[in-house]
Image: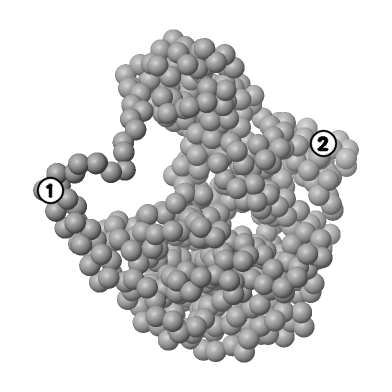
């Protein structure tokens, strides 16, 4: 990230900020989608984050931390979108007409469907940490610095997220063995 | 996927799916908006004015007086309780006056003193139990709302919880409050992995009996109580003073929380809210200051519940 660009944008240079936006927006949107699991919500979160970043940029002291800083704004925007949405949407993914041809392919699709469904049931702050760690590959300490929360809190959220996903998948597998599946 | 590593591998692969490019319309819309949006000014405002005019000092004193008096009047909400709960120390008056609006808890943000309203059992909340045996999750719990008054010095936590700003949740002086539904227990709270292996029925008595009968949980004799107008039972659960040997965490039931530190004291008000079991859980330590313990008690006493 070009420090001079960030500095110029801090001082009100919209052209400089536009360049920064094009540099980070793909990453921001990818993260937002993976947290919110909804393209519309992710777009809203991205827009709100970019606007808020522009407004608050003068408060950014360390220009080197621009990317971490704007990702934190994005995560908070995701929290806001999640509160506004508060919809319990059934995520039923239709299999393609020609369907999987092998049991292995079927199992892969089922696992991904289950991950999707169970991930959506996690609290939004756990989802955020899970995505930042497993998608962006950020170490827990870096996530803590980015979100300005204690490292213990990050560990806790990741712990609960992983535990919740595993519990759900195990429970579902047991039900499948018994011949039933949750809707 | 029976272990964390295989789950994490699968999750990473799954997370790779999905868009990696921001839609142009979203980016362009934001840039268009920015064209007419001003940046915030980075003003540094001093905490005090050195030479505050006399009139301003008098006005400030009057405002502070109103806040203190308002806070004293608003100390406890309605909803009658035969409370139970730890200790009998008088509860302190929550500081500054609560806002006329009901605030929302934001994780990791300091909470201005005031009244807060939370619906902890909605989607993504503390009621979700992923279809485990004995799970009593129901859509009917999504709307249960807890309102309570919080004094200065508390922070929003995950899943609609709060904890101390200056002591956190951990030993030796932390404290916190969280709401859950109760659920299945673990035969070995220090080490068992999900799902819970002791199914528990959906009622208050089911959960309380399971806690009391558990050979490895240190639980007091239940007493009948009412909180916020709802009947239930109160117990204390003492977390062992040494949980260092627990492979991951000390985790008695699911969905629930894991012990935030050795020796944590869990104060549990297990209530029947129109047929739905809820658990109001405050946590502290022997080392938590008497003032903070009293504040925690006052917060619980102030709880109102809207089903």
Q: Position of residue A131 (x, y in %)?
A: 66, 38
Q: Is residue B257 visible?
A: no
- Vertical side of A121 occupied by B221: above or below: below
Residue under circle 1? B54
Q: Residue at x 48, y 27 (%)?
A: A61
Q: Name the residue nearer the viewer: B247 or A113.
A: B247
* Residues packed near mark 1 inside 10 Å, few (<14), some (14 to 19) or many (20 plus): few
Q: Quadrant of residue A102?
A: top right
Q: Position of residue A18 (x, y in %)?
A: 47, 14
Nearest to the eye among marks 2 and 1: give it: 1
Decide if residue B211 is on the left or right side of residue B111.
Answer: right
Judged from this view, the residue extending furthest toward the top is A15
Specify the label residue A100 is tagged with: 2
Q: Quadrant of the C terminus of chain A?
A: bottom right
**Proximity of marks 2 and 1: CB atoms separated by less than 8 Å:** no
The Cα–Cα distance between marks 2 and 1, rounded to whole angstroms, is: 81 Å
- Please state the total of marks drawn on the protein image: 2
* Residues packed near mark 2 inside 10 Å, few (<14), some (14 to 19) or many (20 plus): some
Label 2 marks a residue whose chain is A
Decide if residue B218 is on the left or right side of residue B153.
Answer: right
Q: Residue at x 24, y 61 (%)?
A: B67
Q: Residue at x 44, y 16 (%)?
A: A9
């Amino acid at each position: 990230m070009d420090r001079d660009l960030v500095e110029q944008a801090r001082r009100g240079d919209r052209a400089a900020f536009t360049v920064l936006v094009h540099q980070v927006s793909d990453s921001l949107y990818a993260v937002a989608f993976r947290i919110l699991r909804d393209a519309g919500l992710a777009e809203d979160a991205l827009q709100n984050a970019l606007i808020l970043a522009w407004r608050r940029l003068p408060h950014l002291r360390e220009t080197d931390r621009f990317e971490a800083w704007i990702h934190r704004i994005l995560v908070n925007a995701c929290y806001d979108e999640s509160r506004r949405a508060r919809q319990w949407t059934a995520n039923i993914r239709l299999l393609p007409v020609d369907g999987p041809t092998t049991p292995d392919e079927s199992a892969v699709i089922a696992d991904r469907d289950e991950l999707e469904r169970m991930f959506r049931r996690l609290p939004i702050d756990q989802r955020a940490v899970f995505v930042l760690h497993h998608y962006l590959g950020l170490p827990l300490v870096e996530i803590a610095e980015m979100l300005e929360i204690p490292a213990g809190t990050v560990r806790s959220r990741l712990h609960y997220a992983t535990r919740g996903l595993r519990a759900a998948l195990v429970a579902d597998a047991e039900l499948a063995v018994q011949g039933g599946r949750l809707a | 996927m029976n272990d964390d590593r295989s789950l994490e591998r699968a999750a990473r692969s799954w997370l790779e799916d999905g868009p990696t490019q921001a839609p142009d319309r979203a980016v362009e819309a934001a840039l268009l908006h920015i064209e007419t949006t001003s940046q915030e000014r980075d003003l540094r405002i001093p905490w005090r004015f050195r030479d505050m005019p006399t009139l301003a000092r008098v006005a400030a004193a009057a405002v502070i007086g109103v806040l203190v008096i308002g806070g004293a009047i608003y100390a406890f909400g309605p909803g009658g309780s035969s409370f139970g709960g730890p200790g009998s120390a008088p509860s302190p008056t929550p500081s500054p006056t609560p806002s006329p609006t009901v605030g929302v808890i934001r994780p990791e943000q300091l909470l201005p003193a005031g009244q807060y309203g939370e619906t902890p059992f909605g989607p993504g909340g503390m009621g979700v139990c992923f279809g485990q045996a004995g799970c009593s999750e129901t859509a009917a719990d999504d709307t249960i709302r807890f309102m309570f008054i919080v004094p200065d010095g508390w922070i929003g936590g995950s899943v609609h919880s709060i904890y101390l700003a200056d002591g956190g949740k951990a030993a030796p002086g932390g404290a916190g409050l969280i709401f859950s539904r109760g659920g299945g227990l673990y035969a070995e709270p220090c080490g068992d992995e999900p799902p819970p292996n002791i199914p528990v029925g959906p009622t208050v008595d089911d959960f309380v009996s399971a806690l009391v009968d558990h050979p490895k949980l240190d639980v007091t004799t239940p007493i009948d109580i009412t909180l916020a107008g709802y009947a239930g039972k109160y117990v204390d659960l003492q977390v062992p003073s040494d949980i260092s040997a627990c492979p991951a965490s000390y985790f008695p039931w699911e969905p629930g929380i894991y012990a935030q530190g050795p020796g944590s004291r869990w104060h549990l008000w297990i209530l029947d809210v129109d047929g739905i079991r809820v658990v109001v859980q405050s946590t502290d330590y022997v080392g938590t200051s008497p003032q903070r313990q009293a504040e925690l008690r006052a917060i619980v006493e102030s709880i109102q519940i809207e089903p």
